[in-house]
Amino acid sequence: MRVIKGVAAIIWLLGNAAMVWIPLAFWLIQTTWSTGEKLSALRKRMDLIIWWWSANNARLIRLFNLTEVTVNWHDKDAVSLDEWYLVISNHQSWTDIILLQCHLYPALPPLKFFTKEQLIWVPFIGLAMKALGFPYVKRATKEQIKANPSLRTADRDNTLLACERFKSHPTSVLNFVEGTRRTEEKWRRQKSDFKYLLRPKVGGLDYVLEGLDDHLSSLVDVTIIYPKGVPTFWEFLQGKCPQVKMDIKPRSIPTAIRGEVAQNRRSELAQWIKSIWVEKDVQVSNAMKTS
């Protein structure tokens, strides 16, 4: 029965993604001749597709009884649909993405996240994210950068370009600051300072601060905990993840890291994020002890 549930859930997800293309393709064609305020208004309308997408995926979780999610929102009244937000989260499974989209909706503006360039080839979903302006990042090796020096600044250039588009209307930008999903193997190889987290990397955050600083209202810090073990995405779709805990906390962005050319911004940002990671690791540890 669980396999049948998983297959049905995949069909739902693919169908949901395919349906997205009905309005998206129509609006995408219009962007080829729209300019100025008309283009900004059109892109804002296109972003509503992310909400529709998220709402249908939330329906999937409820109807298929995939998991029980407990959400603890701190100062929920402090966020608004009329502001811009930088969102960070720990990262353990592809499941994190669907949970974040479903449970930050509709409190925050449409959520966009950094994604690997290879995901553009995922049927329906990859091209939809590209059309909606999700920032794509490359994983270039030292050899590739040596052969093509422009790759050194590719991620920064792509992020700043995406941020220019985000400025036209309120947007939430998600960054998994660990840079990859946390697994036991990656944790051991990295020799992480944290028990349940990988070391945070702030390069992507720094680029977003550079591109959106004047627009950002605050940072929204999300902690995702799987008390009964981290599921693969396939296990989640089969209903093998009985419980998820999410802690969502808006945080003021320190003055020291604000400003397009803030002096020593990256080192100040690294210290701030590390302090958040220390707190997050304790929070996950305590939750795992009581599960």
Image: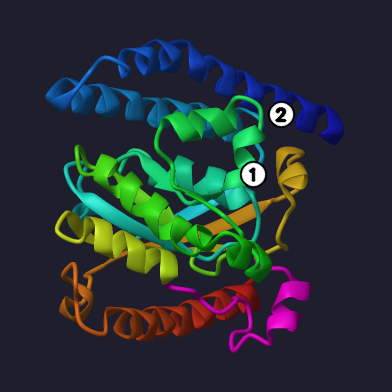
Colouring used for the render = rainbow
Who's the residue at 73% across and 54% down the image?
Answer: 231
**On residue 10, which mark appears?**
2
Q: Main secondary structure of the magenta part?
A: loop
* Quadrant where the image shows the N terminus: top right
Tell whether position 197 is magenta: yes
Q: Nearer the viewer, mark 1 or mark 2?
A: 1
| Front-most of residues 101 and 47 | 47
Where in the figure is residue 89, as x and y percent of width and height? 47, 63
Give the vertical position of 265 relative to 154 (above or below): below
* Quadrant where the image shows the C terminus: bottom right
Task: State which quadrant residue 40 falls in.
Answer: top left
| Front-most of residues 106 and 117 | 117
Who's the residue at 64% across and 50% down the image?
Answer: 94
Where in the figure is residue 274, as x and y percent of width and height? 43, 83
The reply, left or right, for residue 284 in relation to residue 185 is: left
User: As shown in the figure, which amino acid type bears the numbered disc 2?
Assistant: Ile
Where in the figure is residue 91, as x and y percent of width and height? 58, 62
Who's the residue at 61% across and 59% down the image?
Answer: 139
What secondary structure is found at the residue carrying circle 1?
A: helix
Outermost residue toward the front? 147
Task: State which quadrant residue 265 falls in.
Answer: bottom left
